[in-house]
Image: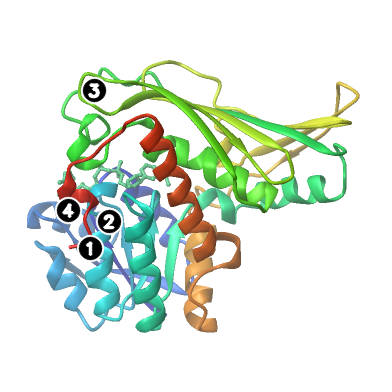
């Protein structure tokens, strides 16, 4: 039985804890919040053994084997570095860090300390995306031409939310666009060689709507829009000369795949999650610990670094700048 700790018991940590509760290999042992009462409430709700009012105490707890980091992305790097230096295995929310350099440092630390360092890009672990890869490899839609995806919600009215705050690495790209970047890369199994991006920045200085074309060595183009200001389809479609595949909303949840040939729907496959979709990455992380590997091949370190590099280039083109304190390696 592996003992898990959670750092940052906010919105998404609830999904994680719900999925972990169904695991036979791991259990929630500890929770850490900047506020002890919040940690205690979360610990009580999900039956954790210990609650801490600071992150350092959980990292130092020898009973904890593996830590899930669910703070805003601005805070991922320093917390992950402290965890790896303490010899803790990690599952960390997307986007892994604020820039590629930070991810590279963490990848080196994971090798140095022989710890699992796993990006929680949960979609990559889902059977739906395995099915998509299979259809593409089996030439069900013929030669690939392009991928199209939209991701986002009309929630720019939120005030004092991490998404609107540059100091918390806010904006649509890092929070949402990362799915389009990562899943295109996964499906195509190649890295983009050309990036073209435009965006509308909000008054707060984060990206509100971002439109990107990623061109791959094969000639395939992945075009995506991410937004925190408009309603959108939240569909991903993959287009070939003889058909297309559609992943309906919300595509990153991987609940259904539809195969079209000659403009007709010929197959629909549903993928109900045993719990909520988080269970796949949780099990994979524990498997990595038991196998002594640093990460799952489906979401490996080279891919994580390339995703961050692609996000860096997009940010440069759209002039999405964050405060130096969250970009640094200190
Ligand atoms: N996989 C998915 O489907 C999914 C969905 C949503 C979000 N995410 C990712 O999960 C991460 C957290 O997202 P969330 O929506 O759960 O965030 P959130 O609820 O806004 O914040 C999570 C926790 O981070 C901690 N935190 C630490 N420093 C903070 C600071 N300076 N300001 C605010 N909070 C701070 C807070 O916990 P304490 O104060 O209690 O320590 C807070 O409860 C993000 O990286 C996001 O990209 C993933």
Disc 3 C-beta below 8 A from ligand 1: no
What residue is disc 1 on? 79
Query: Contact (CB < 8 A) between labels 1 and 3?
Result: no
Can you say whether 11 is above or below 122 in the image?
A: above
What residue is disc 3 on? 158
Q: How far from the left and from the top, in percent, is residue 296?
A: 55, 68
Query: Contact (CB < 8 A) between labels 1 and 4?
Result: no
Can you say whether 158 is above or below 190 in the image?
A: above
Q: Nearer the viewer, residue 40 or 215?
A: 215
Marked residue nearer the N-terminal end (1 or 4): 4
Marked residue nearer the N-terminal end (1 or 3): 1
Q: How far from the left and from the top, in percent, is residue 134?
A: 79, 51
Disc 2 C-beta below 8 A from ligand 1: yes
Q: Nearer the viewer, mark 3 or mark 4?
A: 3
Can you say whether 4 is above or below 247 in the image?
A: below
Q: How far from the left and from the top, in percent, is residue 240?
A: 81, 33
> How many C-alpha atoms fall within 10 Å of the one at disc 4: few (<14), some, or many (≥20)?
some
Q: How far from the left and from the top, in percent, is residue 245?
A: 75, 33
Q: Residue at x 27, y 56 (%)?
A: 76
**For the image shown, how many numbered marks are present on the structure?**
4
Rounded to the nearest angstrom, the CA distance separating label 1 from label 3 is 26 Å
From the viewer's perspective, tell me whether residue 51 is left or right of residue 66: left
What residue is disc 2 on? 76
Rounded to the nearest angstrom, the CA distance separating label 3 from label 2 is 22 Å
Marked residue nearer the N-terminal end (3 or 2): 2
Q: How is the image coloured?
A: rainbow
Rounded to the nearest angstrom, the CA distance separating label 4 from label 2 is 23 Å
What residue is disc 4 on? 41
């Amino acid at each position: 039985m592996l003992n898990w700790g959670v750092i940052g018991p906010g919105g998404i940590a609830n999904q994680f804890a719900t999925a972990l509760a169904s695991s036979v290999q791991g259990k929630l042992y500890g929770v850490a919040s900047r506020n002890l009462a919040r940690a205690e409430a979360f610990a009580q709700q999900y039956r954790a053994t210990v609650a801490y009012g600071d992150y350092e105490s959980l990292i130092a707890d020898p009973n904890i084997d593996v830590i899930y980091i669910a703070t805003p992305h601005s805070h991922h790097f320093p917390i992950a570095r402290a965890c790896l230096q303490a010899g803790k295995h990690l599952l960390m929310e997307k986007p892994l860090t604020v820039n590629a350099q930070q991810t590279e440092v963490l990848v080196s630390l994971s090798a140095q300390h022989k710890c699992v360092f796993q990006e929680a890009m949960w979609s990559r672990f889902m059977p739906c995306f395995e099915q998509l890869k299979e259809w593409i490899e089996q030439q069900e839609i013929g030669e690939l031409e392009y991928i199209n995806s939209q991701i986002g919600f009309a929630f720019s009215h939120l005030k004092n939310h991490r998404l609107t705050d540059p100091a918390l690495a806010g904006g649509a790209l890092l929070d949402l666009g990362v799915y389009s970047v990562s899943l295109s890369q996964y499906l195509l199994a190649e890295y983009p060689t050309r990036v073209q991006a435009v965006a509308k920045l909000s008054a707060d200085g984060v990206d509100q709507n971002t439109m990107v074309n990623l061109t791959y060595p094969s000639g395939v183009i992945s075009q995506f829009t991410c937004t925190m200001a408009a309603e959108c389809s939240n569909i991903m479609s993959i287009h070939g000369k003889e058909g297309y595949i559609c992943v309906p909303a919300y595509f990153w949840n991987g609940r259904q795949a539809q195969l079209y040939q000659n403009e007709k729907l010929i197959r629909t496959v549903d993928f109900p999650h045993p719990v909520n979709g988080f269970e796949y990455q949780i099990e994979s992380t524990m498997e990595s610990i038991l196998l002594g590997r640093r990460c799952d091949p489906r979401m490996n370190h080279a891919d994580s670094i390339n995703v961050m590099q692609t996000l860096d280039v997009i940010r440069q083109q759209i002039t999405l700048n964050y405060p130096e304190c969250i970009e640094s390696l200190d």
